[in-house]
Amino acid sequence: MITVTRPATLDEALSGLDGTGALPRAGGTDLTACLGSGVIGSAPVVDLSGVGELRGVDWLPDGSARVGALTGVGELAGDPGLADAYPALAAVARVLATPQVRDAATLGGNLLQRNRCWYLRNPAFDCFQTGGDSCPARSGDHLYGVVVDQGPCVAPHPSSLAVALLAHDATVLVAGAGSTQPEERPVADLYDGADPARDHVLAPGRVLVSVSLPVPVRGERSSHRRATGRSRSEWPLVEAVARLDCGVDGAGPVTRAAVAVGGVARTPLRLPGVESALVGALPGRALGPEAEDALADLASLCSPLPSTGYKVDLLRATVRDVLERALGVPRS
Amino acid sequence: MDHVTVNGARHPAPVDPETSTAEHVRDRLGLTGTKIACGGGVCGACTILVDGSPTVSCLLPSDRLAGRTVTTVEGLGGTHPVQYAFAAHDALQCGYCTPGFVVSASVFVDTWRADHGDTRPDRDTIAEALSGHLCRCGAYEGIFAAVAAACAGEFDSRPDREPPRRDAVDKVTGRARFSADLAPHGHWEGVIVRSTHAHARVRAVDPGAARTGDAPEDTAAASGTAPVFTDLLGEDRTVRYVGQPIAAVAAPTSAGARAAAAAVRVDYDPLPAVLDAEAARAPGAPVLYPTRAERAAAPSYGEAPTPPARWEGNLRGPGTLSWRGPTAVRRLRRAARASDPLLVSGEFTTASQAHNPLEPHVCVASWEPGGDLYLRVSTQAVAKTAERAAKHWGLPLDRVHVVSEYVGGGFGAKNALSADIVASVELARAARAPVRVAFDRAEELTDAGHRPAARTRVALLADRNGDLAAMSVDSRGEGGVSVGSSAAALAFMMYGRSPRRVRDFDVVTNLPPGMPMRGPGGPPMAWALEQAVDMMAHRLGEDPLALRARWDGNPKRRALYARAAKLDLWRDRPRGPRSGRFRHGVGVAAASWLYLLGPQARVELSVEDGSLVVRSSTQDIGTGIRTVLAGAVADRLGVPASDLRVEIGRSGPVHGTGSYGSRTTTSMGPAAVQAADRLRDALRERSPSVPAVGPVPEHAFKEALTAAEGVRVEGGRGLDRWGQLSPNMADDLALGRGLSGAVHVMEVEVDTLLGRVQPTRCWAGIAAGRVYAERLARNQCEGAVVQGVGYALFEERRHDPATGVTLTDNMEDYRIPGPGDVPETEVYFHEEGFEHVPGGGIGLGEVSVVGVAAALANAVHDATGWRPHELPVRPDRLIEGLR
């Protein structure tokens, strides 16, 4: 039987994970699935649920928030303070997975989960992530694969919260054992699209402690959208988050835009071209020519696989949808 | 020691991280109301409350329960308003997903009422709240109604009326014990070892640590707990698809069995494989069945015996039906050469759909000391399974006992001596202990049957009057290693008697075999034919309903067309080209189905301990035969159905009909009526106060039962007026006179930007004669719409093109519709036209699914001008189509 330890402090947890090969466990939803299907081999488990430092939402004097990694996805979705300050994050938390999974899953676990590739999760196949030296999806059936080809693996990054946090310019605090100081880094630096062997770059033994969000933007207009086949409870083909700063009353021209997308690449991506083209756009008005050009230009970002060409159109469409919703363009 | 509180009782907290909470509550605490279906957090069947919140218990490690409070469905006590409401609104069919729905809905209802008072939430709010649940039977209409009513405070006390479904209370409380819930004392777990090659000769199978029971020295070990092994391949040592059963092992624990399975070594001699239909037809392609004997032994997914046919390599067929066929072909060719505008033709493809019942295939087999064999199995046919088992193991029929009290869905997949049964029986013999073999979801979605993919070419020619002048349909079924396409043949019975030729082909590949699935051949046929008819209506500039009414000679369907034409849904549909991002459209499709019956159906009535017991060896897979039997007897005698006891789900009593082929109710219902009449006669002999006709007064009934203790009568399925069309064929199957009919009108909203189709409203007109149990029949037809929507939009089995491994072997990737994906559905029954049938009604389970996807396709075309030739209509296809 797998042994489980239940440290009460972060230090205990870190020393339990340091060089032991033990697996950290937050909500345990993905770990249970991965252990069950053999994606992850049996190993001792360090259960983090008792570690106080990983819990809670702290509001700092400047109005920004630091959210503990063990905060439940359901808590993120239901916390009125977070929804008010970071509406895009709350919107994403409200639609990912299912209500019952959101009840068990955590922020940290969501950011560091394994991807959903049906080859990775099928014990019949080896891939870069399970000791193999090739990607069977690239040469096989990759209907749900990436459209921005960053490296040998073609599985899109699975974390919707990462898309939202990328759009929020969030940072994460990562701790390791020993005397090393916890290190703060942008959420984007959790991932490396060129590395086919891992879905995040944290070294074994390191623990994601918390996520820090910047000072909220008053009057922010935001939107999140997933393109899916079914209406709900499905991994997105493409998803997008848009945050537009239109002044404190939310009615002025866009002064700053943040647009992030998921489902298209090994990592969540920001779309700087679209962001800069949006500056000056007016709420309630159709997208201007610069924004239209930037949307058209998303094709140049894409490098579709044989079966993912449709995601070029879907990427454009999803981004258009979040921009129009965030701007309040009347629905046709 | 840490504790967990479960339904108010304190238990030691579990410590094993590899046991999920779902496994813990089921296996350790015996709370089997919590179900495991997908095992991956997708379907919601395992939902429990942890500290009051609905939680996915299949992904929650059990060692996380320490100090927490758990409520399972059993803990709701059967008195929550949502439980009353689910039962009263018949918000369930097979009942396997029901406990999960009930647990989530209980929290939603309580929260809603606290926040909004006793008001009705709208459909979308309920869909959102229950978005973590899937129901394969498709009982969503009832679920919406039940949850809304419970929120409105309509079920705060036990309703006075009995629920429409007899076993509803057992299902909403988690009391109903399905075969997957049974774990007899001292049972072992069995695991099937499956082929990892798409095509190979199996040179040898090394059982590893398991004993085979063959060698004399094994006798000594037989009393021990060493794993046991059995071969499943038989004489043909060729495996032809990935996932084909090769052997099975059992051990006292699941972990032991899995380890024993991992230790089995199979020595393969790989053969070249063909993994798609095109490759199978290519010159020089490896041939799956090179010999006549192998071809004859190819499995069939047809519902009737497959007639012999010609083979050419991997292509079988055609099986041709023709009515002035040469005339039809000549006219079509001439029209094609002349580019006749009244010729429409097209090629339509359908993907392979998995049955995916939420209760997997499962069998617990045990050999009793006297040599009797017990099979506690999830099956659609207890009587037939007993016969098959008796034959297979050379036992007298009365030594085989099949029990299947509750069946968590089947849809055609649970009507065979399947690998779970064969393996568990053989392993139980070797182990000298009961052995359970349950498919996991990957097995269920890989090798438990499917509706094969098909490629269908249709050509229709209209003459100058707009009448159908010629029809041809060629359909090629792609059922992996199996054959049995009947899609084209089904088109033969549509649209009158104009010249026509329909041909069915099969192409075999190294992929898992199909099984008959609800209306086999029907949905792919309608997908092609009903779209072609729609094309013709456009070509002729005619209303698609009016064209069908003109072409279709069937009086029952004509009554449905007339009804449909008056619907607001149809009359007020948008006309002309639509623009903008969201576009609405309405489509229609017609369907026809055969009237099948089981002439051997019998029902026994006996008076036992002063009660009247209704018995037969039939089974209830969610369609509601328990309710039908009780209702038929109660109506005939004029006594309350609640006074009767219904005992089904066991072989042994009189022969009962299998639950497949739309024939259970039309066979069993009349048998129950006849039994009731005979019982009345028997009661009258003893109690003169029982009237010769009409309701039996309550006091007279009680008195008569007391006097008639021990009386036993049987009723059978009487003959139809003018007789049946076919004699009783093998497998208790006859073909009756007349066809059932259906017309579906579907409305969709198409999001042309993101490529998503949302069905919004559906009208399902069903003509199958008199309906026995109205609410249950309606539920079944509503569920057919759900399955048809799944077929049209989401469901498809996909496999790795290099190896043939099924990739959609989980419910995340095999996508069935959720509550938010289905249209608001109204079912209308046209009850005339089967007066020649005892009871006046025939089956509706299959006719109700056939045209759904086609109606949806026609609606998509109406909305967008783009016609989906391929199914499912995924976002990528829609986006490309509209580009």
Image (cartoon, rainbow, N blue to C red):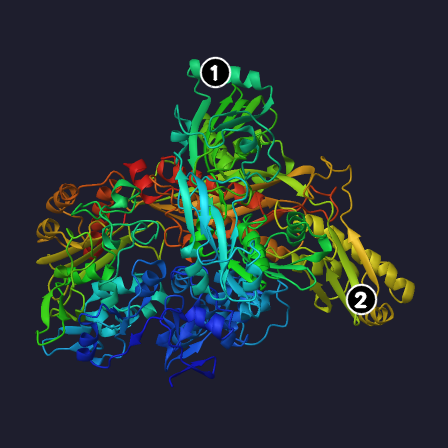
What's the residue at 18%, 54% (across, down)?
A267
Q: Which chain carries label 1?
A: B
Against A183, residue B529 (above or below) is above
Secondary structure of the residue carrying tag 1 is helix
Residue B649 shows in the view: no
Counting from the top left corner in percent of width and height, residue B408 is at 54, 58
Depth check, front residue: A169 or B35? B35
- Which class describes the residues within 10 Å of circle 1: few (<14), some (14-19), or many (20+)? some
Counting from the top left corner in percent of width and height, residue B184 is at 57, 68
In this figure, what is the number of numbered marks? 2
- Per the rendering, the mark at residue B333 is 1
**Is the C-beta separation of discs 2 and 1 under 8 Å?**
no
Per the model, the C-alpha gap separating discs 2 and 1 is: 68 Å
Relative horizontal placement of residue B351, taking residue B717 as reference (left or right): left
Q: Which of marks 2 and 1 is in front?
A: 2
Relative horizontal placement of residue B425, taking residue A295 as reference (left or right): right
Return the residue found at the far bottom.
B1
Counting from the top left corner in percent of width and height, residue B731 is at 67, 43
Depth check, front residue: B684 or B264? B264
Q: Which chain carries label 2?
A: B
Secondary structure of the residue carrying tag 2 is strand
The three-letter amino acid code for the residue at tag 1 is Arg
- Which class describes the residues within 10 Å of circle 2: few (<14), some (14-19), or many (20+)? many
- Per the rendering, the mark at residue B607 is 2
Q: Earlier in the sequence, mark 2 or mark 1?
A: 1
Depth check, front residue: A262 or B756? A262
